[in-house]
Amino acid sequence: MQQTEFAQRREQLMAQMGKGTAVFCSAPMAVMHNDVEYNFRQDSDFYYLTGFDEAEAVAVLSPHHEDHRFVLFVQPKDPDKETWTGYRVGLEAAKEKFGADEAYSIDELGEKLPQYLVGGDRILYRLGRDRRFNDKLLGMWQRLMRTYPKRGTGPTAIADPAPLLHAMRQLKSAAELDQMRRAANIAVEAHVRAMQFAKPGVYEYQVQAEIEHTFRLNGAVGPAYPSIVASGENACILHYTENTRQMQAQELLLIDAGCAYHYYNSDITRTFPIGGRFTPEQQALYEIVLEAQLRAIAQVHPGNPYSQIHDTAVEVIVDGLLDLGLLVGDKQDIIKDEKYKPFYMHRTGHWLGLDVHDVGVYQHGETAHTLEPGQVTTVEPGIYIKPDIKPVEGQPEVPERWRGIGIRIEDDVLVTAQGHNVLTDGVPKAIADLTNLSRS
């Protein structure tokens, strides 16, 4: 992604900030065990505005400053440390490569940052992410407030920049969509490979290995989230990640897996029969979920309320469960009283982008958010009948033959000016396609 893209984002945010000063802290290094750290992944807000991919950094946007509108505090070059932990960008390259008007060592933060805060009328900073940095910034602000009467200028409030920044992040640029399409295409290939590989007797973790091998082989950083490979009744656990069970014939396999390509993510779920043949009960439930997903996807178009996606899926699922006798009563009462929730307990989608559960609002008070071109959402209805499912009051016991079946179908859908585009439609989901592919 070109640096001009990051510069445009900074300018767009600063145009909305007034005379505020925005401060963004990089992600911390996370410890795996003892002195071994996880691979570093930059904070999404920080990356979105800078493209800078190192820890121990702070970005400052000060549109009111005469010379330094964009400032980076970074780790200085240190050949001895770089021998052990990798190359650092350093101060000069922070300006040359990343467009900073000024760059300082992170060790100078306490000395240099106040000069950028004092010129603004408020500080835009998201409290709560890093308690140590919170305390440091709050201390600076308190000192400036104590001297405010002598100057009559300076920040008198701290505000969260998220409402401004996250509204920007919701609408994907052409460059972002290029990366999301690549993430989607890689994940599509991985899911198709998994369908071909999964057979009775194979372990869930072996399927996971095929998926994640395909991710890395095609240039993805790795999984976007812990891959879910859930056979049999494991599919009734929404975030099952143990992936240790040996798969059996006449069971379903639910795979929920996506990859991260650079900083952008995909998120796909498919459910298919191990061995290529649905039982009558599996097929009946699968047909309901597929119809719910197709009709929910049809609701993805500009101007439609986001809630319509979920409401449509719920109606289809409730209709289907009523037809099967797994629910009884008036459809609207069942929906109003949420008596379908033992079978379908989650929402039908979420925003997707730099984060798998990406930022952005779904609701404005009592009014649902309106879909706009450039947004990307998942659409993922499901039905889950746990072995120990308990009916709500007034609903029948679930016969044994339905128990232990979990089904979810998920695609990544871009809102376009004309309607929508399913970025992940390369993974089969029609019953005939699934049975043919998993037998091959």
Image: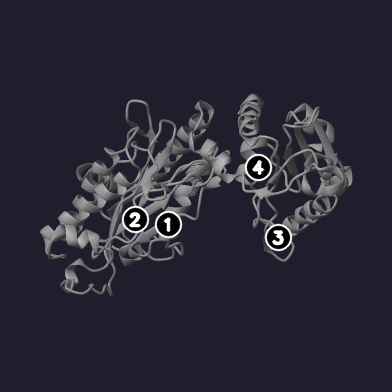
Q: Are marks 1 and 2 in contact (CB under 8 Å)?
A: yes
Q: What is the three-letter code of the residue carrying label 2? A: Leu
Decide which of 147, 180 is in the foreground and name it.
147
Residue 7's x, y, as percent? 66, 28
Tell me whether circle 4 and circle 1 mark residues in contact (CB < 8 Å).
no
Residue under label 3: 131
Instruction: Give the amino acid type for the residue marked by disc 3 in the picture.
Output: Arg
Residue 55 image position (x, y, % from top left):
73, 47
Disc with the residue nearer the chain's start (3 vs 2):
3
How many C-alpha atoms fall within 10 Å of the one at disc 3: few (<14), some, or many (≥20)?
A: few
Q: Could you tell me the amino acid type at mark 4? A: Phe
Alpha carbon distance from label 3 to label 4 = 17 Å
Residue at which label 2 appears:
254
Q: Nearer the viewer, mark 4 or mark 1?
A: 4
Q: Identify the mark nearer the N-term, 1 or 2.
A: 1
Residue 128 in the image: state x and y as whole percent: 64, 57
* CA distance separating discs 3 and 1: 32 Å
Judge the density around disc 1: few (<14), some (14-19), many (≥20) Cα neighbours within 10 Å.
Answer: many
Q: Are marks 3 and 2 in contact (CB under 8 Å)?
A: no
Q: Residue at x 44, y 32 (%)?
A: 374
Q: Give the secondary structure at mark 4.
A: helix
In the rendered structure, are the residues bearing label 3 and label 4 in contact, judged by CB atoms less than 8 Å apart?
no
Q: Which residue lies under the disc numbered 1? A: 228
Q: Is residue 387 above or below residue 276?
A: below
On the image, numbered disc 4 is attached to which residue?
46
